[in-house]
Image (cartoon, rainbow, N blue to C red):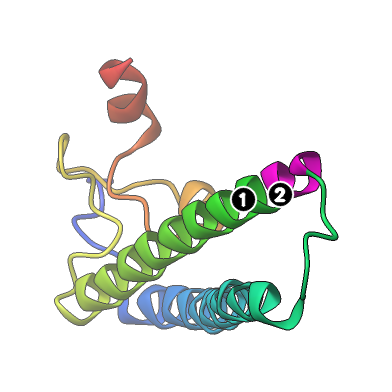
Amino acid sequence: MADLVRYSDKDLAEFREIIEAKLKEAKEDLHLLKGQLDHSDDHGTDDTGRSFNMMEDGSETMSREEMAQLAARQEKFIQNLQNALIRIENKTYGICRVTGKLIKKERLKLVPHATLSIEAKNAQG
């Protein structure tokens, strides 16, 4: 039997469901992160006087930076998922961009925005 060239429409529909669920969850997470970032801006205006010591200020800043990094990573993840939906529309979803072979279903279920097979990913090192 020859290697499959692309996933069937049935398979693509299954992957679409997985991606749309992950996309919904990712957008909710991003919304929460951005809400926390916006809310922590209010913090300084409510407090009168210097009730926080430098240690707390430092940890506050660090957590803001971490939240901002998380939000940026989440935005990139959402973009990758949206790109995967476009590949489903084009019927090119699940095809390794290096080898041109199908990426295994197991990998796509774990990493639905993957564009590389495990072999190609490992070769990158």
Residue at (78% x, 59% y) in the render: 50
Q: Amino acid at mark 2?
A: Asp
- Residue interval drawn in magenta: 54-59
Q: Is residue 94 above or below residue 56?
A: below
In front here: 125 or 60?
60
Query: Which residue was labeled with disc 2?
Result: 57
Residue 97 drawn above or below residue 52: above
Amino acid type assigned to the residue bearing label 1 in the image: Thr
Dot 1: element: helix
From the top left corner, tell me how far across and down residue 60 is, in percent: 70, 53
Query: Would you call the spot at circle 1 few (<14 residues within 10 Å), some (14-19), or many (20 or more)?
Result: few
Residue in front for this viewpoint, 54 or 93: 54
Q: Which residue is mark 1?
A: 61
Secondary structure under the numbered disc 2 in the rendered image:
helix
Q: Residue at x 66, y 72 (%)?
A: 44
Residue density around tag 2, few if under 14, some if 14–19, many if 20 or more, within 10 Å: few
- Above or below, 64 against 58 in this view is below
Q: In this rendering, would 64 be left or right of 4?
A: right
- Residue at left 68%, top 42%? 58
Q: Is residue 22 left or right of residue 8?
A: right
Residue closer to the observer: 24 or 110 = 24
44 and 70: which is toward the camera: 44
88 drawn magenta:
no
As measured in the structure, the alpha-carbon distance from the residue carrying label 1 to the one carrying label 2 is: 6 Å
Report the residue at 25% width, 69% height from top.
83
Location of residue 88 by image quarter: bottom left
| Secondary structure that dominates the magenta span | helix
Assess whether mark 2 and mark 1 are in contact (beta carbons under 8 angstroms).
Answer: yes
Label annotation for residue 46: none
The x and y percentages for residue 54 are: 75, 41
Quarter of the image that includes the C terminus: top left
